[in-house]
Amino acid sequence: MRIVLLVIDSGGIGAAPDAKEFGDEGANTIGHVAQSVPNLSLPNLAQMGLNRLVPLPVHGKDPLKGVAFPVIPRANGKDTLAGHWEMMGITVTKPFQTFPQGFPRPIIELVTSIVGRPLLGNEVASGTEIIARLGEEHCLTGYPIVYTSADSVLQIAAHEDIVPLEQLHQWCRQIREALNESAFRIGRVIARPFRGEMGHFVRTAGRHDFSVVPPGPTMVDVLQSAGIETVAIGKIGDIFSGHGFSRHLLTQSNQDGLEQTRTALKAAPPDAFIFTNLVEFDSHFGHRRDVVGYAQALRELDDFLPRLWQALEPDDQLWITADHGCDPTYKGTDHTREMVPWLAYGPRVKPAVGHYRTGLGDIGATLAALWRVPSTFSGHVASELITTN
C-alpha cells in the first residue's frame, strides 16, 4: 500500500484541553476562518469528515467518504518539531528554549564569530516586518538580520544579492552545528533569504530549516529500514534533519507541494510513505493574520483533493492532519495550542467518525500496524484504518 500524510501546517480545530497553560483558550484556527469567511465552501474536506470535527458551511449534501478523528496533542510544545516528531513516535517532554527578549550575548557572539560581521535585529519579530524595517540597512552594510519568534527558532535574513544563498545556508549550517555543541536547546536555525528593492522586499523560496536531530529513531526510520520507500515533500526533510527518507523534494508553494505529492504518489512503488507539509498555511496566512488568505488556501487544497483521490490504488490511503494551530483571528501572531484533525480516505476505508485520540503518536502507531513492522513507540492503533485485502 501507499500512505500519503498531508500536513496542513497550523490547521487546528479548537483549543486543546491544556490550552490555558499556553495562553490559548478559545483558539480555533479552521473554525474561526470558516466563521469569518461566510462563503467558504470546502465540500471535499467535508466529505473526508472535517465538518464533523469543526463547524463548516455545508452547501448541499456532503456524504461522509472518510474517517475523521479529533486528536489532542501530547507534546510539551506547540511548534513544528513537537507536532511532526510526535506523529512519528517522538514526544517532546522538555520544550525547546525560546527567547522573548532576544538572544543572550553568548548566542550572539557565537553567530557573529561564524558570519564574521556585526548583526542587525536580535529581537522577536515578524519576518516580513523586520526585512521591511531593516532591509535597507542590511543592503548598505551587509550585516545579516537575526531574529526569533515565539517558537524556538534562530532566523537569519539576508538579501540574495548581498549574501549569496549558498553562503547563507552555509552560515546556518555552521550555526546549527555549533548550537548542537552548546548548552542552548534551539529547535531550528532558519535561513530566510529575500530579494527586491527598498519598500518592496519579498522573501524567496530559498528558505532552509536546519533542525536539531531527533533524539532517537522515528517511525520514518523504521519504515525505511523495512524496505518501504519514504518521501519527504516540502520542509519535512528539514524537520527530521534528513533522517529516514529515501527522497527529499523541495517545494515553492502549497500548490507545488500538492502537485509534487500527486506526482510522487503516481510514481511510487507498491509500498511507499509520502509525507508532505503545506507550510504556507502557517507562514503566509496564520502568522500574518491573513484570514482571507487562509480561507483561499483551504479552498485550493479542497479543489485539489479529487486529483489525489483519483491517484489512489485500492489499498492506498490519504491522511490529512496538522501539527498545531495558528489562529489568524486570535491575539498575537504566535502558534496556538489546539486539537488537530486526522482525516483518512481510501478505496477500502469504511466511512466513520472516530473518538477523540490522545496523542499524534497514534498516526505512527497506525503506520506500524498497517505495514506490520515492529514498533516500541507509544500510541494506539486506529483500527478503523486497518483494512484487509
Image (spheres, rainbow, N blue to C red):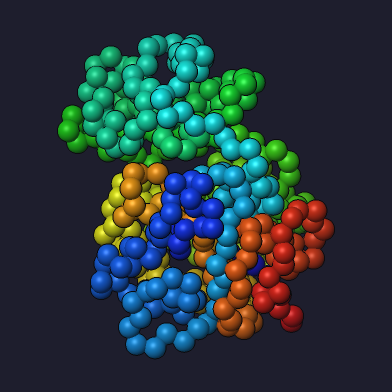
Residue 292, quarter of picture: bottom left
Q: Locate residue 265 relative to residue 205 in the image: left or right.
A: right
Q: Locate residue 265 relative to residue 138 in the image: left or right.
A: right
Is there any visible trace of residue 284 in the rendered image? no
Q: Locate residue 326 relative to residue 360 in the image: left or right.
A: left
Q: How far across and how far down the image is residue 82, in percent?
A: 58, 46
Q: Is residue 304 above or below residue 279?
A: below
Q: How far across and how far down the image is residue 335, in percent?
A: 43, 47
Residue furthest left in the image: 199
Q: How far across and how far down the image is residue 191, in percent?
A: 44, 32
Is there any visible trace of residue 218 in the rendered image? yes
Residue furthest right in the image: 374
Q: Which residue is drawn at 52% across and 65% down?
A: 341
Q: Locate residue 230 relative to residue 325 in the image: left or right.
A: right
Which corner quadrant holds the C terminus?
bottom right
Which corner quadrant holds the N terminus?
bottom right
Q: Residue at x 49, y 26 (%)?
A: 172
Q: Residue at x 62, y 25 (%)?
A: 180
Q: Which of 71 and 253 is in front in this view?
A: 71
Q: In this view, does 277 lie above or below 202?
A: below
Q: How far across and how far down the image is residue 144, in percent?
A: 36, 21
Q: In this view, does 307 lie above or below 111?
A: below
Q: Is residue 7 above or below residue 63?
A: above
